Image (cartoon, grey):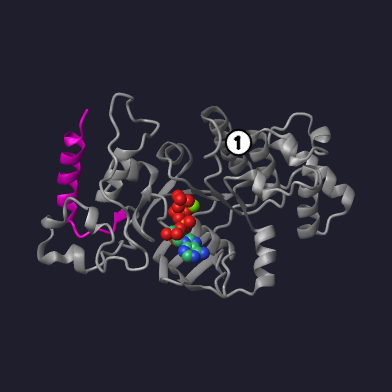
Amino acid sequence: MTLAEPPVATPSTAPFLSVRDLRVHFATDDGVVRAVDGLSFDVGRGRTLGIVGESGSGKSVTNLAILGLHDRTRTKLSGEILLDGKELLTARERELERIRGRRMAMIFQDALASLSPFHTVGRQIAETYARHTGASRRESRARAVEMLRRVGIPQPSLRADDYPHQFSGGMRQRVMIAMALVCDPELLIADEPTTSLDVTVQAQIMDLLGDLQQEFGTSIVFITHDLGVISRMADDILVMYAGRAVERGTRDEVLRTPQHPYTWGLLGSMPTLTTPVDIPLSPIPGTPPSLLDPPPGCRFAPRCAFTEQVPAGRCASRPPVLPRTAPHGAACHLTAGQRREFHADYVTARPC
Ligand SMILES: Nc1ncnc2c1ncn2[C@@H]1O[C@H](COP(=O)(O)OP(=O)(O)OP(=O)(O)O)[C@@H](O)[C@H]1O
Ligand SMILES: [Mg+2]
């Protein structure tokens, strides 16, 4: 049996995934947690969007909203999530389940927690395939073995009969990728899929995802707080801070000419694949705001070194908007000229 043909390119230039003004608010005993608060972004067909931001910035909450996995009784969701033009936020659970299986799939950090310990990996992959395609047991088994081979598991027809705990961490992650891709999804959401792996295995998994993307034409949302991983994987980057997008652009734009003071801080606090080893990393002073009562203006303002450059206390009082029209942009009240100047100063001022 052969794997499905890569999808035929459509003439449409519309993004495959389009998120508009997404809000995800949780009702808790302490009040409403505004985990995601007015987030918009697009993912093109066959492209990889890297979402980066500190812990708690709302990356996973966004990802679960796309997949429709929030408990709707306790979570208030609003905005639009369009998958190939189809609105997901208002879709019924049954329909979402169908879309989740066939059109989008996910891989998480912890493969062991995502796979059942009671069934062999071959059976789990085959069942996923059979459930969503109606294929026979034999066909599904053959497809499972083929997927295991495709993700680089040696002796796939034998290993299909092993249980998840019999695989190493890296191999287990490969099994999860095989399961995620078995129905040939058009969108893959990967939430920190390589975080728990050592650097060599991490690189192998990233290469594998890149190869599979080429082959299947999959769009990928890749969530991580590792800029090294982002710079290797992403075509486009979205930088999140406290539930909002602060900067968006192509990988080179965001990494080479970042426009937002938070992105400058982030780039200075984390190694990337191009950071020379002799440049020390400096963490961003302060901590993210409480999402129960976030600052009314720019959410980064309390930690930003440049608020005094903006007149009339605007950073503290007015939320800056991320321009929709420009491909590269930042939600910041500094002027474009100020950003160029301050970024240059910021880079030279960094201790080295
Ligand atoms: N079910 C929930 N109820 C209340 N608050 C929640 C819930 N789920 C997430 N949050 C809060 O929403 C915020 C965003 O969480 P999220 O898990 O999306 O962060 P993240 O960017 O994925 O962080 P990390 O890099 O650590 O994975 C956090 O403050 C978190 O505590
Ligand atoms: Mg997360």
Q: Nearer the viewer, residue 287 or 83?
A: 287
Q: Is residue 232 magenta?
A: no
Quadrant where the N terminus sits is top right
Q: Is residue 68 left or right of residue 334?
A: right
Q: Is residue 208 left or right of residue 271?
A: right
Residue with the most extreme top position? 278
Q: Residue at x 80, y 38 (%)?
A: 160
228 lies above or below 92? above
Question: Would residue 15 be visible to someone looking at this image?
Answer: no
Figure quadrant of residue 172: top right
Q: Residue at x 56, y 66 (%)?
A: 70
**Residue 150, how many percent across, how many down?**
71, 37
Q: Is residue 343 magenta?
A: yes
**Residue 188, how many percent across, how many down?**
59, 51
Question: Would residue 130 be visible to someone looking at this image?
Answer: yes
114 lies above or below 245? above
What range is drawn magenta here? 329-352
Q: Sort mark 1 into few (<14), some (14-19) or many (20+) by Cα contacts within 10 Å.
A: some
Q: Residue at x 22, y 27 (%)?
A: 352
Q: Is mark 1 within 8 Å of ligand 2?
A: no
Figure quadrant of residue 147: top right
**Residue tagged by mark 1?**
208
At label 1, the amino acid type is Leu
**Residue 185, how many percent across, how many down?**
65, 53
Q: In the rendered picture of this protein, how many numbered marks are placed on residues?
A: 1
**Residue 266, how many percent across, how many down?**
32, 44
Q: Nearer the viewer, residue 235 or 6?
A: 235
